């Protein structure tokens, strides 16, 4: 069985982070949880240090002033130095059903990226579980799993030009162009509390979103 690591970038919002971490440690029983703290000023860091004393599977990374996709690339590169690892990259503002990440990791054999099923809510029980091939445009950027062996020789999983948006599209599209296969694990859902971290963004989010869109078109075309 592959080692299963879940990585979460966070900045403040302990009300989201603590339940997400507890779920991963207790309900999904992942092998490690990587908390990428992007410069929290609330009690996130103190809480994480205290929680780590109870469960050393929780690892804390000080990533203040780093952009979201730079953190994602760091997660992928770090995990790729280990052998036989599945890496879940997750938002903190999500709610997953029991054993969701472990189930997805077990079902994605032969695929390099697995996404949750957007048509199912996180409160619904996991059932059926057909694995459906997908293309990069069907990505789910707030909850997905990578087979990191595929990225072992890729120094830049995501183009560093991206600030806040379109970097997930870049990651998925790069994977598919390189021969990677993407799937959706049907029946594994997720609740996502969108826009919950907008207040933590250091700049004008929508100006940067438009800049990212133009960079994506420049790199990939329409």
Image: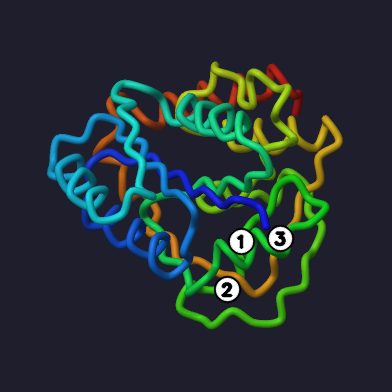
Residue at image x 14%, y 35%? 41
Q: Residues within 10 Å of mark 2 (few under 14, many from 20)?
A: some
Residue under circle 2?
120
Number of residue marks: 3
Quadrant hosting residue 132: bottom right
Disc 2 and disc 1 in contact, CB within 8 angstroms: yes
Residue at image x 74%, y 58%? 108
Disc 2 and disc 3 in contact, CB within 8 angstroms: no
Report helix, strand or loop for mark 1.
Answer: loop
**Residue ranking furthest to the right:** 179
Is residue 76 or residue 198 the one in the foreground?
A: 76
Disc 3 and disc 1 in contact, CB within 8 angstroms: yes
- Quarter the C terminus occupies: top right
Q: Residues under labels 2 and 1: Cα distance?
A: 9 Å
Q: Viewed as shown, does residue 131 lie left or right of 84?
A: right
Report helix, strand or loop for mark 2.
Answer: loop
Q: How crowded is mark 1: few (under 14 residues within 10 Å), some or many (20 or more)?
A: many
Report whether residue 166 is seen. Answer: no
Earlier along the polypeptide chain: callout 2 or callout 3?
2
Residue at image x 65%, y 18%? 155
Report whether residue 182 is seen. Answer: yes
* Above or below, comparing residue 106 to residue 90 in the picture: below
Residue under circle 1?
116
Percent across and percent down for residue 123 are: 45, 78
Residue under circle 3?
184
Report helix, strand or loop for mark 3.
Answer: strand
Is residue 164 or residue 84 the one in the foreground?
A: 84
Q: How crowded is mark 3: few (under 14 residues within 10 Å), some or many (20 or more)?
A: many
């Amino acid at each position: 069985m592959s080692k299963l690591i879940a990585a979460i970038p966070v900045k403040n919002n302990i009300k989201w982070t603590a339940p997400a971490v507890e779920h991963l440690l207790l309900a999904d029983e992942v092998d490690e949880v990587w908390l990428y703290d992007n410069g929290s000023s609330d009690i996130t860091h103190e809480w994480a240090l205290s929680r780590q004393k109870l469960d050393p599977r929780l690892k804390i990374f000080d990533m203040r002033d780093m952009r979201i996709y730079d953190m994602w690339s760091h997660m992928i590169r770090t995990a790729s130095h280990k052998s036989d690892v599945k890496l879940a990259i997750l938002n903190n503002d999500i709610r997953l059903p029991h054993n969701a990440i472990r189930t997805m990791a077990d079902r994605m054999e032969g695929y390099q990226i697995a996404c949750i099923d957007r048509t199912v809510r996180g409160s619904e029980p996991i059932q059926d579980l057909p694995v459906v091939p997908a293309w990069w445009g069907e990505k789910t950027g707030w909850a997905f799993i990578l087979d990191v062996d595929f990225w072992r020789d890729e120094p830049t999983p995501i183009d560093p030009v991206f600030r806040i948006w379109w970097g997930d599209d870049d990651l998925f599209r790069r994977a598919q162009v390189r021969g990677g296969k993407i799937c959706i694990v049907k029946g594994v859902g997720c609740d996502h509390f969108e826009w919950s971290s907008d207040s933590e963004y250091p700049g004008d989010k929508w100006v940067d979103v438009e800049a990212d869109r133009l960079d994506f078109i420049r790199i990939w075309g329409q």
